[in-house]
Image: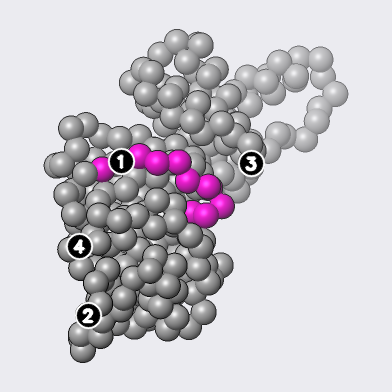
Amino acid sequence: MTDRIMDEALAWHSAQQSDDCDWDAFALWLEADPRHRDCYDDVALIDRAIEDHRPVLQSVLTPPAPVDMPRVRHRRAIWAMGGLAAALALVFGLSTFAPGRDAAVDYRTGPNESREIALADGSRIHLAAASHLHVAGERQDRLTIEGSAYFDIRHDPARSMVIQAGDQQVSDIGTRFDILTMGRAARIAVAQGVVTVSSPSLASAITLGQGRQLIVDPADGDAEVQTVQANDVGAWREGRLAWDNMPLPLVAADISRYAGRPVAVSPDIAGRRFSGVLVVGDGTALVGDVARLMDLKVADRGSGLLLTGARP
């Protein structure tokens, strides 16, 4: 690890406290050299440990009462250096040997119902309607999502969080992102930060920065990276659904969670795309809105609704 890499890691860690951080440049910096991620993790780990154990550090580093002697300054400086080292050792000892917890738990929501979930490390997850989140692992670092959720994950280098979304595995370094998954279909959109997505169907892992989304088309399993407006990521939390060139089966999966009934797409229109913004409301009008905007028909099949291009 060089001084240059350390300086860059410190600069990036500081830059992320600002709303105008260049997340694309940060993603490129991480990918440029494996040492970059290691160094950034070291910086973040120290910062996290200091923040979590600030009272301990303050008590250890509180200097003694001033004494009017010329040589005390030098001794105090030596004491401070030793005290900081001891305090950091104590902090990392607390972090490393803190007792684990069995965090395995399931969270479920019904139609038009959402809930906010707080993890032990301060991360927060907003679970969308008709969705299921499974949280497991001693560090709450093994998650599985079915449906949709918005993740606000705190970066912790000591933890490797993996979120299973269908066939996709999403790992983060401290980010805000939204996942929608149903069967083979998936959308991973990043509002802030960087995530890595891997899957058996991908030749290699894909890194997504702010304003990027990965779409997995359920028709053929193909994945593509698109640009997305950061303020549209997780827009459902504000009562609106936003799509840009979205495969119609994914749109159907999205509105199913609010319509209260499964919405499917007939094979004759499965390859079509939809762009638009709809107000959720009570969810009952969403299927009709999509059908009207795309000149489609809606067939009631008893157990669910079918969007089709031909008159049923």
Task: Sort mark 1 into few (<14), some (14-19) or many (20+) by Cα contacts within 10 Å.
Answer: few
Q: Earlier in the sequence, mark 3 or mark 4?
A: 3
Q: Secondary structure at mark 3?
A: loop
Question: Amino acid type of disc 2?
Answer: Pro
Question: Residues under labels 4 and 1: Cα distance?
Answer: 22 Å
Q: Are marks 2 and 1 in contact (CB under 8 Å)?
A: no
Q: Is disc 1 in contact with disc 3, using a CB cutoff of under 8 Å? A: no
Tell me the distance, in whole angstroms, between the alpha carbons under discs 2 and 4. 12 Å
Q: Which residue is mark 3?
A: 19
Q: Nearer the viewer, residue 95 or 164?
A: 164
Q: Which residues are magenta?
A: 223-233
Of callouts 4 and 1, the N-terminal one: 1
Residue sticking out furthest to the right: 68
In reply to whether residue 231 is colored magenta, the answer given is yes
Separation (CA) of disc 3 from disc 4: 44 Å
- Judged by depth in the image, the label closer to the viewer, 1 or 3, is 1
Helix, strand or loop status at disc 1: strand
Q: Which sits earlier in the primary sequence, circle 3 or circle 2?
A: 3
Tell me which corner region of the image, top left, top right, bottom left or bottom right, holds residue 62: top right
Say whether disc 2 or disc 4 marks the residue closer to the N-terminus: 4
The quadrant in which residue 205 appears is top left
Q: Amino acid at mark 3?
A: Asp
Asked if the magenta segment contains residue 225, the reply would be yes
What residue is pinned by disc 4?
268
Q: Residue at x 56, y 52 (%)?
A: 231
Where does residue 148 sit, x and y in percent of width and height? Answer: 36, 64
The Cα–Cα distance between marks 1 and 3, rounded to whole angstroms, is 27 Å
Hey, which residue is sitting farthest front in the picture?
Answer: 311
Could you tell me how far apart the alpha carbons at marks 3 and 2 are, in whole angstroms?
50 Å
**Residue at 29%, 82% in the rendered image:** 261
Q: Which residue is mark 2?
A: 312
